[in-house]
Amino acid sequence: MITGARREGTRWPRPQFLTARSDGPVAFSDSGWRWWLIEGHAGLPARTIDHYFRTGDSSGITLLREKAAKSRRFYRIAPTTLPDSPHYFAKQMTLPPRKRLGALLGRSNPLVGYSHGTAELSHNLALNEQTAHGVRTFAFGEYFRGGLPVQQVLLQEYLVDWQPFNAVWKLHEDNATLRRTLLLQFFDMLVSLRDAGISHLDLHPGNVMVSPDLQAPLRAIDCGQMSMEADPAISAALHLGVFLHELNGKCTSPSSQLEDGACRLLYGLVGAEAGFATAERLLPLLVRHSTKKPFSRRCLLRHGPDKLKLDAIEKRLLKLSQHRPSAPAAHVSGTARRQEQRLIASIDEMMTTTR
């Protein structure tokens, strides 16, 4: 028990993964926030942000950014009482009424929602425990109203000097060796996800972080949308399709060479899986088209390969593309084509290296 914290009761059963891995819930003040401490040293940063929520005193707290009309806020925490302690990352989310019961019970379904903090905590823990590509989570905070959580906070490792994959990729567009290394590391991540049975539904280049030490494993962030039950071949196709579509500048008319390269990567990942033939036909559609909402990636993963209607999926993606913002003119320019050819060359070199 952390000194100065008081034990809080729970009116409802909480998810087993939460109660088994953490000490809590505890309260540090009369802020109304309750905390589950997953690692022993989490008390200090949790107490720091609890103090901020109660008093508004931002000492040691930096607001990094806000999203979606302030329903999500992101902070860096640097506890002032221990200047040499590591920094921490905090993600605060406000829950709409529909998702509060799911957040309380740790349930995810169409009725109570999928993307609440309890689900993201579960995904983060699974990813970090089962692969080398997760981010450590130290504590989990909740603010209740009417017996249900209305706000939640994830307190995590702060990735000092790490950069998103797409930023590093763009910065080193003329460095073929480094780009090959990045793709090899991404392939290693996909192998780990395949072996763990984890599908990250938003694995785009902005959600894959690269360490200053380029030999360190990549990390996946923003894990609110994940599945543990998808077919491995369809899951791999989704991972590759989303990633390469974004890395290719969201171009809606990629070359056949890029689609062929993507399929070779897919074969290296899941060529022995029963669903490979279907996934191989699906992947070019995902490389060509955006699969952001209102298209449902989760619905795609919910069906087995033998139940996927690829013609209907293609029609749906084509229809949605007509209502999405047009791609920048650069995508038909020589610059865009040169960038695509560099991506294709990097895939070719990577595949040669893996063989």
Image (cartoon, rainbow, N blue to C red):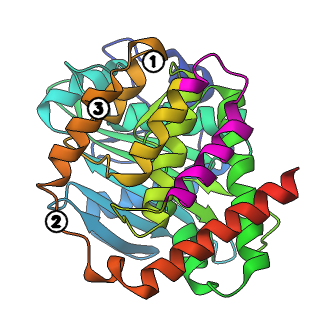
The reply, left or right, for residue 129 in relation to residue 329 is right
> For the residue marked with disc 2, what is the amino acid?
Pro
Residue under label 2: 325
Residue under label 1: 15
The reply, left or right, for residue 84 in relation to residue 326 is right
> For the residue marked with disc 3, what is the amino acid?
Ile
- SS assignment for the magenta stretch, majority: helix
Residue under label 3: 313
Outermost residue to the front: 256
217 above or below 307? below
Q: Nearer the viewer, mark 2 or mark 3?
A: 3
Secondary structure category for the residue under label 1: loop
Report the Cα–Cα distance between label 2 and label 3.
20 Å
Q: Nearer the viewer, mark 1 or mark 2?
A: 2
The reply, left or right, for residue 329 in relation to residue 130 is left
Circle 2 crowding by C-alpha within 10 Å: few under 14, some 14–19, many from 20:
few
> For the residue marked with disc 1, what is the amino acid?
Pro
Secondary structure category for the residue under label 2: loop
Which of these two is toward me, 100 or 287?
287
Instruction: Please say whether residue 259 is one of the residues in the magenta stretch.
Output: yes
* Magenta stretch, residue numbers: 256-277
The reply, left or right, for residue 27 in relation to residue 80 is left
Report the Cα–Cα distance between label 1 and label 3.
35 Å
263 above or below 280? below
The residue positioned 43% from the left and 62% from the top of the image is 254
**Where does residue 95 sit, x and y in percent of width and height?**
21, 40
Which of these two is toward me, 185 or 288?
288
The residue positioned 53% from the left and 82% from the top of the image is 338
**Where does residue 246 sit, x and y in percent of width and height?**
43, 62
Secondary structure category for the residue under label 3: helix
